[in-house]
Image (tube, rainbow, N blue to C red):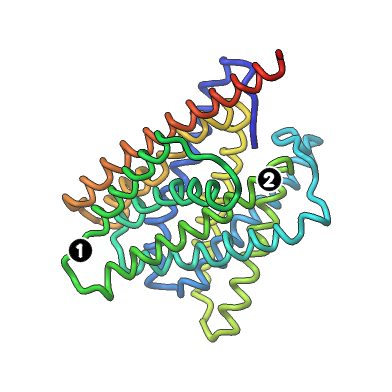
Amino acid sequence: MAVAVTDVGHLPRGAVAGIGSAVLFGISAPLSKLLLPHADPWMLAGLLYAGAGCGLALFRFAQAAAGRRGSMDRGNRLRRGDIPQLVAIAVIGGGVGPVLMLIGLQHLSGVAGALLLNLEAVLTLALAVTCFGERLTRREGVAAAVVLGGAVVVSVDTGPFRTEQLGVIAVAAACLAWAIDNNLTARLSSRNAIDLVRVKALTAGAGNLVLAHLAGHAFPSPAIGALALGIGFVCYGLSIVLDVYALRYVGAARESAFFATAPFAGAVAAVPLLGERVAPRELAGGLVMAVGICLLIAARRRAAGQDLAASASASAG
């Protein structure tokens, strides 16, 4: 969703919303890992997205009751023709992605799992170029390579392949699923963002819960289920609401810079939440990834500026 920033006075509010959104999403990884010993990954993924969907549905209901429907997002309503893309988004991004992520977290430390989420930005860019007709600048290519190099450092392991490397593959596959989701969602960027994500979350949550139950996976205890729903609402639902505010206040370019802190927020949160220590390779890989993400954001801004300049020149001509 492209948003034009017209008032620099909104920057502080946009920064708070953007960073708040990133922090909430980032800590979802270590918080989910805390629940994994008590719930099957498939069932847990369903509960997390069901919590997000129900939370956004309640938020929209409260917004409508207050007479403020659409005040946050003036996008068009969803249409019947959007159904095929919505189904793909729900299945791939809301169904497959979170399950793979949770499977990966079973075999990785919370720090490593959170840091590897940086792969989502690189894979999103790669798919945009190879499958959706967008162009890649040399600077973006270099930045993507740096992030991938950091991921390799994080994933280096001296243990047996079937443990940690399996987790790396699962998280990388989850990031690929979310990259597909991002590119498909971009095609619906003119639609109301909150309604779009609400449909995705409710569909994916309900689908995963039903399929997990049919596959023989038991529902967790009521306490664990309630915690999962709450984490889903806060770390996915509320995070998305704040992200919409950030997009509205500061625009897509600045928002992407704020949200790029999410994996690092998750890695930092894993230390007190899970009692983990940051391994030297995780620290080194995280620093390399941070450099790559900064380069990628700068390259995207430069490319966007060049596109705007070219568009303005063409209009003037």
CA distance for labels 1 and 2: 40 Å
The amino acid beneath tag 1 is Asp
Q: Nearer the viewer, residue 180 or 244?
A: 180
Look at the picture and state if 63 lies above or below 29.
Answer: above
Residue bearing mark 2: 194
| Secondary structure under the numbered disc 1 in the rendered image | loop
Instruction: Give residue 120's position: percent from left, percent from top.
Output: 45, 51
Instruction: Give residue 57's position: percent from left, percent from top.
Output: 70, 52
Look at the picture and state if 188 lies above or below 18.
Answer: below
Residue bearing mark 1: 157
Task: Return the mark for residue 101.
Answer: none
Instruction: Give residue 193's position: percent from left, percent from top.
Output: 68, 44
Q: How many marks?
A: 2
- Which quarter shows the N terminus? top right
Determine the residue positioned at 45% across, 73% down: 39
Foreground disc of the pair 1, 2: 1
- Which quarter shows the C terminus? top right
Determine the residue positioned at 40% across, 51% down: 119
Determine the residue positioned at 51% across, 62% down: 97
Q: Earlier in the sequence, mark 1 or mark 2?
A: 1
Label 1 CA crowd tier, 10 Å (few <14, some 14–19, many 20+): few
Q: Nearer the viewer, residue 93 or 230?
A: 93
Determine the residue positioned at 51% across, 73% down: 42
| Secondary structure under the numbered disc 2 in the rendered image | helix
